[in-house]
Amino acid sequence: MSRSKIRLGVNVDHVATLRNARGVDYPDPVEAALAAERAGASAITVHLREDRRHIQDGDLLRIRGAIKIHLNQEMAPTTEMLEIALEVRPHEVCLVPERRAELTTEGGLDAAGLGDRLAPIIARLGAARIGVSLFVDPEPHQIEAAARLGADFVELHTGTYATLADADLIEWQSGARPALGAAARAEQAKLRAAIRLARSLKLAPNAGHGLNYRNVAPIAALPGLVWLHIGHAIVARAVSVGMRRAVGEMIALVGASRAGGAANAGLAARATARKISGARPR
Ligand code: PXP
């Protein structure tokens, strides 16, 4: 399986969150997208939510017109969103579940249970030559359903891994335990198996959600991943060091983990944890 270069998609939703908190016109997600592009990102990801809590319709159109790299539009599988995607024509649409009360996307799409609803949307996006990705948990039956429905990609939900790994890595930095505990390693293994299954079904596997500078290395090291989509951690880091540097640091970290595979993932994470937090992991 290839260890080829992994591509980073930067999600700029939370630049809009900050702007909307005051009802002003700054910071501008378009500027952030352009800074991410200049820093070497391969894609910009935006989630146009039904409640428009961060990205607005105009942001999506302006980003589409401004960037030269790939645009990945995350959206709920609804008629309204389908019509918008067909008008905006992003390179790729990632279908995600959406619940209004959630803080962020909480779980993967039930591709296996929602086939009747998803099939016509996937067909129309495909006919418009828009790549289709389904955001799913790393469960075999969901990946098999995505393949049956004719998706091009699956984006594997890394949220469970990220939550487990973050707790482990905080203890690890104080020297209290090995880098990843058994539960995080089991979730990493699940993601590895999901990547293999997706590839065997001719789906291109992507991953994202909850990834940050501390926990990304063991995921970036998994062979066969095509894209990583990361948002909150990069935008949060950009508050301290600027978007260009925040994106550059993530690209360097992902590249280093990738080059060395799983064995180097710990080293890359360790070096970055030290550089970014000033911590001295043992
Ligand atoms: N991938 C998908 C499908 C998402 O819904 C999100 C959150 O919008 C992300 C990736 C990025 O997650 P995070 O902001 O935690 O990096």
Image: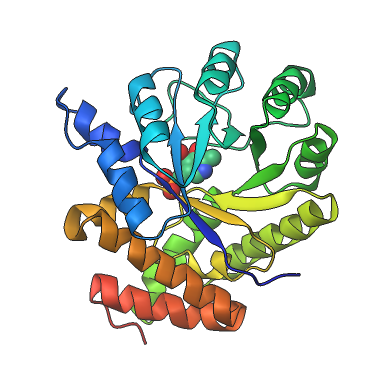
> Residue 190: x percent and y percent?
70, 59
Instruction: Give the colour scheme of this rendering.
Output: rainbow
The x and y percentages for residue 101 are 43, 23
Q: Residue 64 falls in which quadrant of the image?
A: top left
Question: What residue is rendered at 76% in x and 40% in y?
Answer: 142
Q: Provide residue 233's location: percent of width, then percent of height.
A: 35, 53
* Residue 17 image offset from top left, x and y in percent: 28, 33
Q: Quick check: can you spot residue 176?
A: no
Quadrant for the N terminus in the image: bottom right
Q: Quadrant of residue 120?
A: top right
Quarter of the picture holding the C terminus: bottom left
**Which residue is rendered at x = 56% and y = 14% of the image?**
83
Left or right of 64? Residue 125 is right
Is 177 placed above or below 98 here? below
How many labels, in total? 0
User: Is residue 60 rendered to the left or right of residue 4?
Assistant: left
| Front in this rendered view, residue 133 or 110 | 133
Q: Residue 237, can we see it?
A: yes
- The residue sitting at 77% across, 26% down in the picture is 113
Q: Is residue 116 left or right of residue 277?
A: right
At 57% from the left edge and 82% from the top edge, which residue is drawn? 260
